[in-house]
Each structure stands twice: as C-alpha cells, then as structure tokens.
Amino acid sequence: MILALESSCDETAVAIFNPAHGLVGEWVHSQIALHEAYGGVVPDLASREHLSHIGPLLQQALASVPAGTISKIAVTNGPGLAACLAMGLSAAKSLGLAWHVPVTGVNHLRAHAFSPFITLHAANPTTFDAEFTRLLPHLGLLVSGGNTALFSLDVPRRIRPLASTLDDAAGEALDKGAKLLGLGYPGGPQVEQLAATGNAAAFAFPKAVARRASLEFSFSGLKTSLRYQLEKMAPAEIERRRADLCASYQCAVFEALVRKSKLALEGGGYRSFGLSGGVANNMTLQGELTIMTKAQGVTFLRAQPQHTGDNAGMIAFAAWAERETGGVNEAGLALEIAPSLPLAVT
Ligand code: AMP
Ligand code: MG
C-alpha cells in the first residue's frame, strides 16, 4: 500500500492507496477559512498550519490500516510554496527512515493529469492497464488556481505540454473577477452560484484567447474589460446585475477553454479527453465539455470533486500509475523540494 502526503499550498492531505483495490481512505484539512480574511494564501501561515495538522491526519490515516502494510511513501515535491512543500517532505522522510520504506517524490501537476483516471482504476483495478491504454492518446485540460494547461498523454504514458496561459490561470481569472465583483475568496464557486441565475449573453466580454489559431490562453484582457465595465456602472446597478455579470464573465473564461480544447482535439487522433484541477468542479464547464467531446467522438473523463483541488489521493495514484514512466522522483531521503517544477519538460 502507498501512503501519500500533500502539502504544496493550502491543503494538508494524506491518503492511502491499495493498487489492488483503490483508495483506502483520504484525510484532508483545508485552510481556506484561515486565508479567506487575506484574500489569498499567506505562505507563512500555510506552512505553520501544515505543521500542526500533518501529525493528527497521519495518526487518523494510519489507524485505518494494519501496522507494517505501507510499502511506499509518496509525497508532493513540487510545484508549490517552498515552506509548505518542506513540511510534507520532512514528514515523509521521517516515516521512510523509521519504517525503512522508500520515499517517492510526485509532481503535483502530473498527479492532476492522472486524476481523471482514478475512477477508471477504482471500477476495475485488474483491467486498468488495458483500459487505460485503450483511452490513449489522451488530451488533458488542467484548470486550477495556479495553472491552465493543455497536454497530451500518449502510449508510453508520456506527457507533452501543448499550451499554457500567457498570464493568469483560469481559476485565477475567476478569482480576480470575483474580487472585482465584491465576492469572497475563492471566487470560482461563488461566480458559478450567481451565474446560475444570470444571463450569459447580457454582457459581451472579449473571449479570452491569445491568437485565434494558437492554443495558448490569455485571461488578463478579459479581467481588464470586466474592470472597465464595472467602472461604467453605479454600485446599485452592479448589485442588481451581479448574476448577469458573473454569467457573462464565466462564459468568456469557459469559451476559451472549450474552444482551445476543441482545436487541440481536431485532427489530433485522441481517444479521450480529461478535465482536472479546481475549476473542473464547475458544472457549466463540465456540461459544455460533455457536449464538445461528444461531438468530437472522444471519451470524456473528469476528476471527481474530492480529486480536483489539492488532495493526496491523486498523489498516491500518480505514484502508482507513474511507477515505470520516469515521471516520479525516486531520490528517497535525498529528495528535494522543487517549487517551480513544470508539468513536463517541453
Ligand atoms: P486548485 O488551484 O486546484 O486548488 O483549485 C482552486 C481554484 O479552482 C480556484 O481558483 C477556485 O476559484 C476554482 N474553483 C473551485 N471550484 C470552482 C467552481 N465550482 N467553478 C469555478 N471555479 C472553481
Ligand atoms: Mg488549494
């Protein structure tokens, strides 16, 4: 069984994965409430919070399996906040040393890339390898607070980045837009909630695309156009039209995601499309991608809500799924933090 630890940003998480059955359990402590007052993650507070929660979470997790059954420890070694990553690494190394069990470093972004396949494994662990191979080549869209990436995953489980964002990440664009609209942090879920009763065609925001034919994303112009729009409106009008503003703004963000994904799928010979990261929780985005992938004739896989944000379940799963691909770091006790680790080398 694999014990996984995740502490790259504002979630302290532990998971235990049994390759023959799936995830045995997942334990998370979210720091959202702590950082809310500051409108974003405060690194020093975050690392202290990891320090106070990682012990109790490990205690709970380890109480659920017989002693001596952990044969590998997986830990996020990047990308993320240095002081936060260090907390997970030192806990993982201590356990590895005490138990004489190998410690493997997992790339958080690659773990997101594999997260849409967790349910496929859980449905039938014995046929996973064959089913997984049948779904390749795969196009992935990773949309989170810090990343926006389109990448391909092909037969030898190799990840090739195809596009990223020139400025803000998709989740960041939603969070910044929400802030301009006077909503709390994180903004994505609040924008979704308000957008549900709004009219997406009420305001014509520019579609967040860099160049039409390019796969790259760009969201900063969209955010600026929301600011200009709000400057033209009286506070009472903004209040009255907040749902329409949310729906139109969210629509522009998703238009870019769907359009670029479609562009990448066309002629790419892909068999499946995967959606991962925090923004994957959005039901409007899920709906639009369901329609688009159906029209393109590819299987749509998405990470489940417990695996979209930061979580250790995907770290454990990636440690297993990447065991023979070179995508994980086997440095063991010499493992170092890699705050700017990329999804893959281009
Ligand atoms: P992550 O960076 O993966 O932890 O995800 C956090 C990001 O996902 C933040 O930018 C959130 O605003 C965004 N997010 C979470 N839930 C939703 C949702 N339902 N709709 C849109 N964005 C969301
Ligand atoms: Mg998070």
Image (spheres, rainbow, N blue to C red):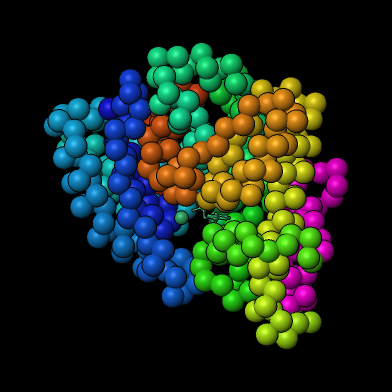
At 70% across and 51% down in the image, what residue appears? 254
Query: Relative to residue 211, is residue 3 drawn left or right?
Result: left
Depicted 321 relative to depicted 258: above or below: above
Query: Relative to residue 236, is residue 210 drawn left or right?
Result: right
Could you tell me residue 269's position as x and y percent? Answer: 74, 22
Looking at the rendering, which quadrant does residue 156 occupy? top right
| Segment colored magenta | 204-230
Looking at the rendering, which quadrant does residue 296 occupy? top right
At 43% across and 38% down in the image, what residue appears? 314
Reply yes or no: does residue 330 show up in magenta.
no
Could you tell me residue 74's position as x and y percent? Answer: 35, 36
Depicted 26 relative to depicted 218: above or below: above
Looking at the rendering, which quadrant does residue 29 occupy? bottom left
Query: Relative to residue 202, is residue 125 drawn left or right?
Result: left
Q: For the C terminus, which image quadrant?
A: top right
Q: For the N terminus, which image quadrant?
A: top left
- Ligand 1 quadrant in view: bottom right
**Which residue is outermost to the front?**
197
Residue 34 visible in rendering: yes
Residue 108 visible in rendering: no
Query: Relative to residue 329, is residue 51 drawn left or right?
Result: left
Count every numbered label the image shows and give the total: 0
